[in-house]
């Protein structure tokens, strides 16, 4: 079974630039999560989708971050404009509806903002 | 106070040692608890769920203490391959699949 796919794996941008990340969850997983993991910290949930609806985006900095999951499968996370403190690994995870805590993570996108 | 806090690491232990990690949570209404393992520069992977009665999976034992609001992970007979960061995760009450992670505890098992 294919795992969660993410791209790109690495990205280096300058502050104030824009960046987008892509995630393809495991087939059949209705719930998709975006996490931010800063070095030395645990993952922090940014947004949770169930199918194409947002379940929780309480910790998403909406002035600069946006995310969508238009057809209930793939998702994109965008940062515009980026700040130095956005340097982190952005992890996408997915889960089945009836097992929401058994989350399968993708390899992540390592973002460096200079 | 952070919602989920873990023992600061790193833990450096010899092969064969027994090591235990603790994780405290602040929300007494939290419902579900988990341990994830994260290898260096890799994604987290679910290690085990933590049940009220405690649970064991081979060399790994997880326990929950609701009265004191902490969970623990015990690793017996440590292997070199156990070297990783262990993340505890807590689901706040009635918040779907939301997980709040601790900062992680790094374990290094030496020969």
Image: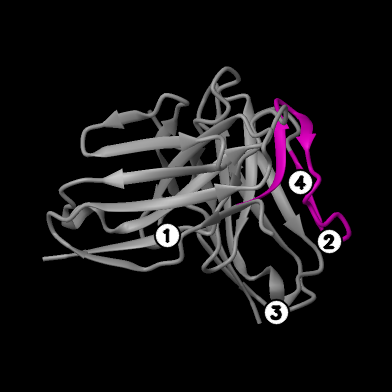
Q: What residue does disc 2 label?
A: A64
Quadrant for the N terminus of chain A in the image: top left
Task: Classify residue A20 by image quadrant.
Answer: bottom right
Is B110 magenta? The answer is no
Q: Residue at x 73, y 36 (%)?
A: A69
Which residue lies most toward the bottom here? A114
**Is residue A24 in view from this perspective?**
no
In this rendering, the answer to whether B8 lies above or below A6 is below
Q: What residue does disc 1 label?
A: B105
Q: What residue does disc 4 label?
A: A67
Q: Are marks 2 and 4 on the same chain?
A: yes
Q: What residue does disc 3 label?
A: A14
Calculate the distance from the C-alpha at mark 2 to the C-alpha at mark 4: 10 Å
Calculate the distance from the C-alpha at mark 2 to the C-alpha at mark 1: 31 Å
Q: Residue at x 74, y 55 (%)?
A: A78
Residue B34 position, x and y percent, is 48, 37
Please, what secondary structure does the residue beneath circle 1 have? Answer: strand
Of tags 1 and 3, which is closer to the observer? 1
Quadrant for the C terminus of chain A in the image: bottom right
Of tags 2 and 1, which is closer to the observer? 1
- Identify which residue, A38 or B90, lies in the foreground: B90
Residue A35 position, x and y percent, is 62, 50
Circle number at residue A38: none
Which chain does tag 2 point to? A
Q: Which residues are magenta?
A: A44-68
Q: Residue at x 42, y 60 (%)?
A: B105
């Amino acid at each position: 079974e294919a795992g969660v796919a993410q791209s790109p794996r690495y990205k280096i941008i300058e502050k104030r630039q824009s960046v987008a990340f892509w995630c393809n969850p495991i087939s059949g997983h209705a719930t998709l999560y975006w996490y931010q993991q800063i070095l030395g910290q645990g993952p922090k949930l940014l947004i949770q989708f169930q199918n194409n609806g947002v379940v929780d985006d309480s910790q998403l900095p909406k002035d600069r971050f946006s995310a969508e999951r238009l057809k209930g499968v793939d998702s994109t996370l965008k940062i515009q404009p980026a700040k130095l403190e956005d340097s982190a690994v952005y992890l996408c995870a997915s889960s089945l509806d009836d097992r929401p805590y058994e989350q399968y993570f993708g390899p992540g996108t390592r973002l460096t903002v200079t | 106070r952070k919602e989920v806090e873990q023992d600061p690491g790193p833990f450096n232990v010899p092969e064969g040692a027994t090591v235990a990690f603790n994780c405290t949570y602040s929300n007494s209404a939290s419902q579900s608890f988990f341990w994830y393992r994260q290898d260096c520069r890799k994604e987290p992977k679910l290690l085990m769920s933590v049940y009220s009665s405690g649970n064991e999976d081979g060399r790994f034992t997880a326990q929950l203490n609701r009265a004191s609001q902490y969970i623990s992970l015990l690793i017996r007979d440590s292997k070199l391959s156990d070297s990783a960061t262990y993340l505890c995760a807590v689901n706040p009450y009635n918040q779907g699949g939301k997980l709040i992670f601790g900062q992680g505890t790094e374990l290094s098992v030496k020969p």
